């Protein structure tokens, strides 16, 4: 926590810098956010340099930095890209290909899948890694996705594709925000065999929080807890207050003079590398610019502006190395019982990529099985009944697998969840990506046990390729395969519609207050209705009347 340094001398010898500290006593606590400031403040207060150096004009630093300027262009061929993030080691990110003004809609809105009582059905805790659940890194609390989603079950998590899964978090550069989903079944009713086969939670919109330039990466807010819970492998990611501490350090007279006046170029670069590579890490240290040019730029315009500039990729780069995300727009499918479908938002030529599909892996498909419950006399709680599987998580309908393997691959990009089956005349096919920036081809040779290990992020990618020219507004389909088609035909053959009244309202509609003219029928599943307000009122009345009961 404290640092004592004496007789510190920095000597300039050619392009190297030697730091001599005859006596340093360090007692360190990892989360002390000011430790690097204390150390370098001590160095700067005792520094001795015998050299003549050229004073750097901070306003000319920009001349040495190529600031990306896409202001005179906007990509008419694609409005949203997936590409390598500008954050080091953050994987993929999302970039806009056009101007976005504050409150502009980003993309077309994404679907959300409820994940029901996942710990109960797997007999453990995903947070303790009792089973491998890769969505730990991607799922949402239900109240952040829909005001009604949490009433789906006792415990619910939400998995949103597209903007709900791909963007990275940067607390200083947050420029996008998701809103609530809509809920409807796309015209599919309780009498249709397709009911329950797709998620009714859809069109989760994302909006720009500020003016965003073409080529700029989109960032959302994961919340500080998300990073604090992952320090072991993410390190000390800077949080909101840490950027202010870092800026104060960078703008201090001693650092400013050292980087701009006192040290020659090579020595200044060496010194800044020493600052960044200081062994006792902290969140404010992580907020500092990573090289000398960016540090000098940060002195002139501030760290935030430097990071904004570094979060912008040239549009030519995105066109060459990125993959377009907005060739697909959702709508009600033209296929009976299918619910929603995917439609071309622009003309797509034969052989072109329609959409990328980054993949998450589930090494054991049995983790999606749902079980009935039974009372356990030992624990005095309800536990899962292994002998009575009652279904599977809805997520299964959006994943790919092979009957001879336990591994499931589930896309989490934008739009591909809406692509329906067509064995007669599909207009797209799926291929493995050949781009090593998106697809780790060596994983295809791995055993399933590889994915059961410490692999928590995606590393493979499908590409949907146009089999012919696809015109704007045309529904996009591909062949799910013979096994899926036979299973669907069997489902249709044995489908028995439930007996419901013509004025039947779903539990969700009742929860939303649509009670006018309702006739309660004996066959209405009343236990699906959220009665929490009634229970709360009952217990309040019980508490009020308790003192009035006779002893």
Image: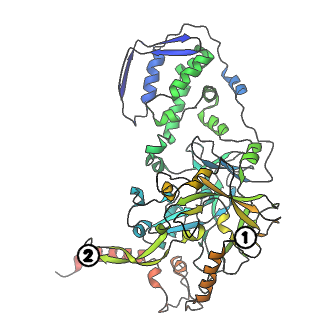
Bin the neighbour count of mark 1 within 10 Å (Cα to Cα): few under 14, some 14-19, many 20 and up: many
* Spatial separation of the CA atoms under disc 1 and disc 2: 51 Å
Front in this rendered view, residue 395 or 402: 402
Disc 1 is placed on an element classified as strand
Quarter of the image holding residue 375? bottom left
Query: Within 10 Å of the Cα at label 2, are there few (<14), some (14-19), or many (20+) other Cα atoms?
Result: few
Check if mark 1's residue and mark 2's residue have beta carbons within 8 Å: no
Query: Is the residue 340 above or below the residue 78 in the image?
Result: below
- Mark 1 and mark 2 lie on one chain; the one further toward the N terminus is 2
- Residue 173 position within the rendered picture, expressed as x and y whole percent measured from the top left: 60, 43
Q: Colour scheme of this structure image?
A: rainbow
137 in relation to 474, above or below: above
Q: Is residue 185 visible?
A: no
Q: Is residue 350 above or below residue 386?
A: above
Residue 29, label in figure: none
Q: Circle 2 — which element?
A: loop
| Spot occupied by residue 108 in the image (x, y as percentages of width and height) | 69, 62
Task: Tell me if residue 510 can be seen.
Answer: yes
- Badge number at residue 477: 1
The residue positioned 62% from the left and 49% from the top of the image is 92
- For this view, does 409 lie left or right of residue 425? left
In-front residue for pair 218/445: 445
Please, which residue is most extreme toward the left here? 551
Based on the displayed image, in which of its 4 quarters is residue 377 positioned? bottom left
* Percent position of residue 230, x then y: 45, 47
Mark 2, residue position:
377
Quadrant including the C terminus:
bottom left
89 relative position to 329: left or right? left
Q: Position of residue 410 (x, y in %)?
A: 58, 62
Please say if 234 is above or below 402: above
Residue 433 falls left or right of residue 526: right
> In the rendered image, which quarter contains the N terminus?
top left
């Amino acid at each position: 926590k404290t640092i004592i340094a004496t007789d510190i001398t920095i000597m300039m010898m050619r392009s190297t810098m030697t730091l001599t500290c005859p006596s340093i006593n360090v007692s360190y606590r990892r989360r002390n956010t000011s430790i690097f400031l204390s150390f370098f403040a001590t160095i700067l207060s005792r520094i001795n340099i015998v050299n003549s150096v050229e004073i750097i004009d901070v306003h000319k630093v920009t001349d040495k930095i190529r600031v990306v300027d896409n202001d005179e262009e906007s990509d008419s061929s694609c409005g949203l890209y997936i590409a390598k993030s500008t954050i080091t080691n953050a994987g993929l990110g999302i970039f806009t290909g056009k101007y976005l003004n504050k409150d502009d809609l980003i993309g077309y809105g994404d679907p959300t899948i409820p994940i029901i009582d996942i710990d109960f059905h797997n007999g453990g805790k995903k947070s303790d890694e009792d089973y491998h659940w890769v969505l730990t890194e991607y799922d949402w609390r239900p109240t952040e996705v829909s005001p009604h989603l949490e009433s789906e079950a006792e415990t619910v998590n939400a998995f949103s594709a597209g903007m709900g899964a791909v963007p990275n978090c940067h607390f200083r550069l947050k420029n996008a925000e998701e809103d609530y989903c809509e809920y409807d079944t796309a015209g599919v009713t309780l009498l249709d065999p397709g009911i329950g086969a797709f998620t009714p939670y859809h069109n989760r919109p994302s909006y720009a929080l500020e003016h965003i330039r073409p080529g700029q990466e989109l960032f959302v807010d994961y919340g500080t807890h998300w990073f604090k819970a992952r320090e072991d492998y993410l390190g000390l990611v800077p949080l909101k207050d840490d950027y202010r501490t870092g800026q104060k350090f960078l703008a201090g007279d001693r650092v400013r003079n050292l980087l701009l006046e006192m040290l020659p170029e090579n020595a200044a670069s060496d010194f800044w590398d020493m600052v960044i590579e200081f062994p006792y890490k902290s969140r404010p240290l992580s907020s500092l610019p990573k090289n000398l040019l960016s540090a000098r730029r940060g002195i002139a315009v501030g760290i935030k502006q430097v990071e904004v500039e570094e979060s912008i990729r040239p549009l030519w780069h995105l066109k060459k190395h990125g993959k377009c995300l907005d060739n697909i727009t959702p709508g009600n499918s033209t296929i009976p019982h299918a619910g929603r479908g995917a439609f071309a938002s622009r003309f797509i030529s034969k052989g072109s990529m329609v959409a990328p599909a980054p993949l998450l892996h589930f090494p054991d498909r049995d983790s999606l099985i749902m079980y009935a419950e039974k009372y356990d006399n030992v624990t005095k709680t309800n536990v899962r009944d292994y002998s009575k599987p009652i279904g599977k998580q809805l997520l299964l309908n959006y994943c790919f697998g092979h009957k001879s393997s336990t591994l499931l691959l589930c896309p989490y990009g934008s739009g591909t969840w809406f692509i329906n089956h067509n064995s007669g005349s599909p207009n797209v096919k799926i291929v493995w990506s050949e781009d090593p920036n998106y697809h780790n081809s060596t994983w295809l040779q791995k055993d399933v046990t590889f994915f059961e290990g410490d692999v928590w992020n995606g590393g493979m990618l499908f590409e949907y390729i146009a089999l012919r020219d696809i015109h704007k507004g045309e529904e996009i389909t591909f062949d799910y395969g013979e096994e899926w088609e036979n299973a669907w035909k069997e489902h249709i053959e044995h489908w028995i519609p439930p007996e419901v009244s013509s004025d039947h309202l779903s539990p969700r509609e009742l929860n939303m207050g649509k009670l006018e003219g309702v006739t309660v029928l004996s066959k209405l599943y009343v236990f699906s209705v959220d009665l929490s307000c009634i229970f709360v009122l009952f217990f309040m009345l019980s508490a009020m009347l308790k003192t009035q009961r006779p002893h």
